[in-house]
Every structure is written in C-alpha cells, then in structure tokens.
Image: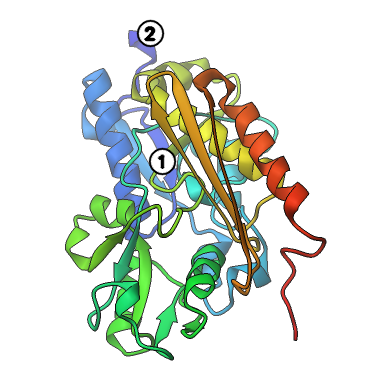
Amino acid sequence: MTHDLPSPASPLRIGTRGSPLALAQAHETRARLMAAHELPEDAFEVVVIKTTGDRVLDRPLKEIGGKGLFTREIEDAMLSGEIDIAVHSMKDMPTLQPAGLVLDCYLAREDVRDAFVSDKVVRIADLAAGQVVGTSSLRRRAQLLHRRPDLRVVEFRGNVQTRLRKLADGVADCTFLAMAGLNRLGMARVAQSAIDVDEMLPAIAQGAIGIERRDGDTRVAALLEPLHDAPTGQRLAAERAFLARLDGSCETPIAGLAELDGGTLRLRGEILRPDGSESMAEDESAPIEDGAALGHDLASRLLGRAPAGFFDWRTD
C-alpha cells in the first residue's frame, strides 16, 4: 500500500477537540502513525473541531444532552469528508456509531484510576464534614456521596487546566481527574493520590483512546491496523456492552472495569442513584471471547435488581 501512504502533499487529516488533553491524544496518534509507517510529521494534519460540550460550559452536561456532546460535530466532519480519522477519549463515546462510521482501533490503555486533586488534603478520607468537592461527573458525585454524604458537591466543568484554576480560586476544596489524562499531559504530579479501583470504580473505558474512521475506507483501516491494541479492545468490548445494555449516558451514574487474566476476563460493574443514596454492584468472569455477552448479562442482572426509577433524580 506504499502508494496510498499520506504525504505532505496529501496529508491524513486527524480530527480532534481542541483541549490540551485532546490535542495530546491526537499528537500521540500521529506519532504512532509516523513510527508505524516511517512518515514525516507533515504527512499528517491535526484538525481542531469545536463540539457542543466544548462550547457550552455554564451548564451541567445532563442539561444539554448525554453522550455525543464531545463527538457529534467531529463525526459529522468525518462523514462529510473534512477529516479522515477522529481521535476520541473512549469514555466520551456513545455505544453506537453513526451509520457510515467504524470504531475498531484502540491505543494501549493508560492508567484507569481516578486522581484525587487537592492542595488541602491527601485523600478523600481526610476531608472534613461539609467540605466542598467539585466535579461535573455524575458517577464521581454519586460514588462520593454514597461513601461521604456529609460532603458538599458543586458543578465543576471545563478541561484539566480550567478545573485546576477553579480549585486554586477556592471554588472547591478538591476535585477528581483521570490519572490517564494527567499522565498524557505530563502532569501526574498534580494528583495528591490515585484512587484504588476498589474504592472508586472508574468510568466505562476510562484511560482508553479510540480512533474512528469511515466504514469501507480500506486505506485508512490498513494505516490504523498496526496501532490497535487487542487487549484494550477485548476489555472495552465487555465494558461497552455493559454500558449499552444499561442505556448509559452522561445522565446516569455507571461505573465498570474489565481486567484480563490469561484467557479470562473479569468484569466489575456498578450503578448508583444520582444522589448516591444507593449503590448496586456485580462482579463476574468469563472467557475473553465472551466479553460482550458478559457485559450484557452483568448489566441485565443489575437492572433486574434495581427498582423502578433508580436513575431518576429525587426531588425530596
């Protein structure tokens, strides 16, 4: 496929959001493509696309829509031919792709844990009753309030740098970020501590980067093939099947993590009431090739246990 390789005259256009983390992920993808195919940097063009989630920063995500807020405009650009591939944080991705698009390339997964960030205390356990926690994640909010209903939670949206600035301005006493994002930005030192997954189960697909392309684009598929990390794909197949069965969105507190041990895949899943008053968890293992079925079954078990209106916001 030598004659089909990108070149400075005809670069491969990589679509991405414009945040520092999104750009770091796009640049990592470009670097991996350059190495895999021995190509110069100018054989690729990084195209920044502003999404609804980036534009609307003064309202909680649940008020402006669910998953897709950070992907829709990028996917539209790919369908219209403005870009050739799109680089996504997989925890932002809906479980279904628009007709004409395929998501089958994942980079090796980074640290899946949440980071606890504060200039006042080291761990969640050190927080005093009434202290203020900033987060825009319903999952993190619900998990925190389930364990510490004595804390106050305030809305905390924006990219990593924006959230750190809000913290410095005293809007909250602490916040949570993803260790993966901090690592990719070279900012791991920002974390006071990484939260063990047994204490706070991460978001579905946290730490994973996915590269989306047009269906039937065999040239791009061949370019991406050397980048795909099979174990990450196996883990995400189970996690995303779990999410799909739960019809998960940014409005539902859902956590899940798949881990590999030899030929076995272990999946842990958790659902919570939005106010954190109740949590339900399941844990099951199966052969790796049955990961998607395992995700579906685990979610079905949780749905079977959950009473009607479990995900509804309580007004009492």
- Front in this rendered view, residue 237 or 289: 289
Residue linked to disc 2? 1
Nearer to us: label 1 or label 2: 1
Residue 47 drawn above or below residue 278: above
Residue shown at 43% from the left, 59% from the top: 200
Mark sitting earlier along the chain (1/2): 2
| Label 2 element class | loop
Residue shown at 35% from the left, 38% from the top: 109
- Alpha carbon separation for disc pair 1 and 2: 25 Å
**Residue 80 visible in the shown view:** no
- Front in this rendered view, residue 5 or 55: 55
Contact? badges 1 and 2 (CB < 8 Å): no
- Residue farthest toward the right in the current orientation of the protein: 308
Would residue 12 appear left or right of 242 to someone viewing this image? Answer: left
Report the amino acid beneath label 2. Answer: Met
Q: Answer with the quarter of the image where residue 34 lies.
A: top left
Residue 63 drawn above or below residue 81: below
**Residue 38 visible in the shown view:** yes
Quick one: label 1, few (<14), some, or many (20+) residues within 10 Å?
A: many
Residue linked to disc 1? 209
Residue shown at 66% from the left, 30% from the top: 100
Q: Answer with the quarter of the image where residue 309 lies.
A: bottom right
Residue 306 drawn above or below residue 5: below
**Residue 267: image location, x then y, percent:** 52, 37
**Residue 259: image location, x then y, percent:** 42, 35
**Residue 288: image location, x then y, percent:** 50, 21
Q: Answer with the quarter of the image where residue 161 lies.
A: bottom left
Report the amino acid beneath label 1. Answer: Ile
Would residue 54 appear left or right of 64 to someone viewing this image? Answer: left
